[in-house]
Image (spheres, rainbow, N blue to C red):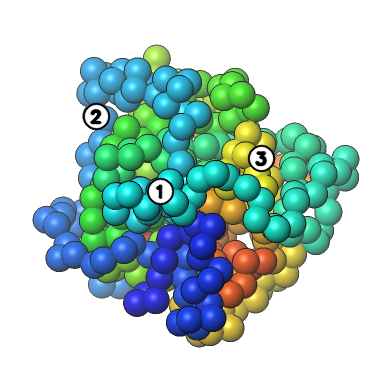
Amino acid sequence: MTMSTPLLAAAPLLAGLIGPALIGAAPGAQQDPPAFTPVHAAKRTRIVEHVAARSTADQRRVLGYWTPERMAKALPIDLLDVVTKGGLLSGLVAPRSTGGQTAPQRGHGKPQTSTIGSRWVTGGLVAKTTGRVFLTLEGADFVCSASTVKSRNRDVVVTAGHCVKNGAGEWAANWTFIPGYETGGRQPFGQYPARRMFVAEPWSRSGDDNHDVGMVALAAPRGRHVADVVGTQEIAFNRPRGGQAFGFGYPADPPYDGDHLVYCAGRLKDDPYTQTRDQGLGCDMTAGSSGGPWMTSFDAGTGRGTITSLSSFKYSDDQHTMYGPYLGDAAKALFATAERA
């Protein structure tokens, strides 16, 4: 997309100046794509791979990098452009305040079928399969969200493409997934560094928001695959558009703090600006929720569902709708590659 800006406190001001703009997904200035390795093709969509922490020594280094202090200071990925453009961070981001945003709703014992942002307190499978991602990009530390998915190798998680690779820019480093993340940085199910990362070529080439999907094959510390430890959610492709969906994530910008699993629920709608094939979900979740799973056929009692999209971006003149990519043939090829890694 050409009209894009990172998600930050001043973003809503842009709506009156340039019309609808994307916030949260597309990278900043476009670059010529770096060399990449196409490893799979389906319907002319190439998949781009990056080898992350393959050796045991590399995986230990990643785990050692993420001290409690570094995790506490990591920023939502949507602030990437602000952090890496020098001198802007303190003026635009700090001090952190709600800025008049609606406060997050309290958790409810019985999940709601319509909410723009409530704490998930029911537990179930989703409370284990959803987690926080910590990564380094362009020399700064960031956070995202992700979910395990049922896969052949028992190692795959799905997240946003911009939580893996900055469009045509760099791949993320020090990438690690903490399923079932709890308040204060508790890690009840451990931590899983990335082995290999995958995005579709349109994302790697130009940050195409229709392809803002990343698949990551995780390491299995001490021989324990993440699927065996926390379980998985189903994932489906080319599903009918619309319908009811539940979206989950760990929003970290005010009024949220990144310590709690939050959900939105409601009916999906098409992008009213027709700039993407994405669908929208009424949702007040903020930066940090990027990559969190959207599920249809979701059973609130068991916390099981089928992933059909994920949190990707918002338009600057509509802070109450999150958009997520449609998982079609390209995403299917992406998943097929990752589950064989």
* Mark 2 or 1: the one toward you: 1
User: Mark 2 or 3 closer to N-term?
Assistant: 2
| Contact flag, marks 2 and 1 (Cβ < 8 Å) | no
Looking at the rendered structure, the kind of residue marked 1 is Leu
Q: Position of residue 81 (x, y in %)?
A: 35, 56
Look at the numbered disc 1 and give the secondary structure of its residue: helix
Where is mark 3, residue-wise?
A: 261
User: Mark 1 or 3 closer to N-term?
Assistant: 1
Determine the residue positioned at 73% across, 35% down: 124
User: Mark 2 or 1 closer to N-term?
Assistant: 2
Q: Position of residue 252 (x, y in %)?
A: 57, 43
Q: Position of residue 83 (x, y in %)?
A: 35, 48
Label 1 neighbourhood size at 10 Å, few (<14), some (14-19), many (20+)?
some
Q: Quadrant of the C terminus?
A: top left
Looking at the rendered structure, the kind of residue marked 2 is Arg
Label 2 neighbourhood size at 10 Å, few (<14), some (14-19), many (20+)?
some
Where is mark 1, residue-wise?
A: 89
Determine the residue positioned at 42% across, 26% down: 70
| Residue 223 shows in the view | no
Query: Looking at the image, is 219 positioned above or below residue 233?
Result: above
Between residue 204 and residue 317, name the one nearer to us: 317
Relative placement, left or right, of 152 versus 186 is left
Relative placement, left or right, of 332 versus 166 is right
Look at the numbered disc 2 and give the secondary structure of its residue: loop
Query: Looking at the image, is 330 positioned above or below residue 305?
Result: below
Q: Which mark is residue 54?
A: 2
Distance between the alpha carbons at the discs numbered 1 and 3: 26 Å
Distance between the alpha carbons at the discs numbered 2 and 1: 33 Å
| Contact flag, marks 1 and 3 (Cβ < 8 Å) | no
Label 3 neighbourhood size at 10 Å, few (<14), some (14-19), many (20+)?
many
Q: Quadrant of the N terminus?
A: bottom left
